[in-house]
Image (cartoon, grey):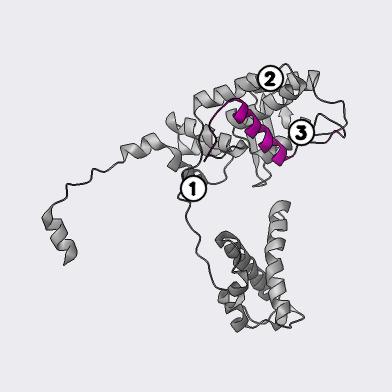
Amino acid sequence: MTNTAESTIACIRSNLYSFGEYITSLGYVSIEETKKEDLISFPLCLGACSPSLIRDNLMAARGLLRYCFDEEIMQQDISHFVPKCKKREQLHIPTVYSAEETSLLLKTINRASPVGKRDYPMVLLATRLGLRACDITRLSFSNLHWDTSTIEIFQKKTQEPVVFPLTSEVGDAIIDYIRYARPVVDSKNIFMKMIPPFKPISSSTLASIVTRYLKEAKIPIEGRKHGPHALRFSLTGRLLENKTPLPIISEILGHTNTNTTMSYLRIDIAALRQCNIEVPPFNGYIQEEVTK
């Protein structure tokens, strides 16, 4: 797992905990004692978990057993005896804020205050460039390349390098914050908390900041996602409205695979309406054929 993000590794370890507890409950002291018939009953101890968590636990157990066989810890590959849980397709439409709502959100931030000077560039990075919250909060001075007007990072989620344009709007906002509001503290992170002890902003804090400004702007958020990722979706929506090709959107969003970007197509309501198929009029013949 040399190229796997630490957060992903931690998640897998957490998912394996249930499997370890299950093996222990059977009286086994090592995984080599596990039998294929034991695996069929494993999902029963996950009954209180959500479908997605059950799926993740089963996948983790399957991966561990396959690893043990590959490393000759176990003499037989019994990983395929772990029951599979089919992934449910995401049918909901992601939250998208209109260009007018995004503009109102940005205007609501008081750029005359130190807190506003910090928050404004963070929200800009989400709305204009589509950066994930984790990448915004981890942004360091070394990521800013003023000579080439680029922001160059390794995405936390994918561990892949990606280059964003350092536009004058974003650059000026960052400079304004660094010069006049950022606490004088020795940290590689750009965005810091404004009260002692001065520590880098966390992703959860950024989510709360975005939510607060949406409420202050009186933008309806009931029944809608209201964090930085919703702003990322909103950027995608505007790109789709402007007929931006998928490969370019993938590059802008830092997706490693265009197929990932294709899942965003369901937010392009205008394009979906063009695919509308007229329902033929109902007649007795159809009813007769159906009831036979």
Residue 83 x, y percent position in the rendering? 55, 73
- Judge left or right: residue 247 versus residue 189: left
- Eye-nearest disc, 2 or 3: 2
Residue segment shown in magenta:
198-224
- Judge left or right: residue 9 versus residue 167: right
Q: Is residue 33 above or below residue 271?
A: below
Name the residue type under label 2: Asn
Give residue 275's quadrant in the image: top left
Please name the residue that numbered disc 2 is placed on: 110
Tell me what residue is drawn at x 64 percent, y 83 percent.
Answer: 35
Name the residue type under label 3: Ser
Name the residue type under label 1: Asn
Tell me, yes or no, whether the highlighted magenta stretch contains residue 3. Answer: no
SS at mark 2?
loop
Q: Earlier in the sequence, mark 2 or mark 3?
A: 2
Please name the residue that numbered disc 3 is placed on: 140
| Alpha carbon distance from label 1 to label 2 | 39 Å
Q: Earlier in the sequence, mark 3 or mark 1?
A: 3
Residue 90 x, y percent position in the rendering? 48, 51
Marks 2,3: beta carbons within 8 A = no
Marks 3,1: beta carbons within 8 A = no
Please name the residue that numbered disc 1 is placed on: 259
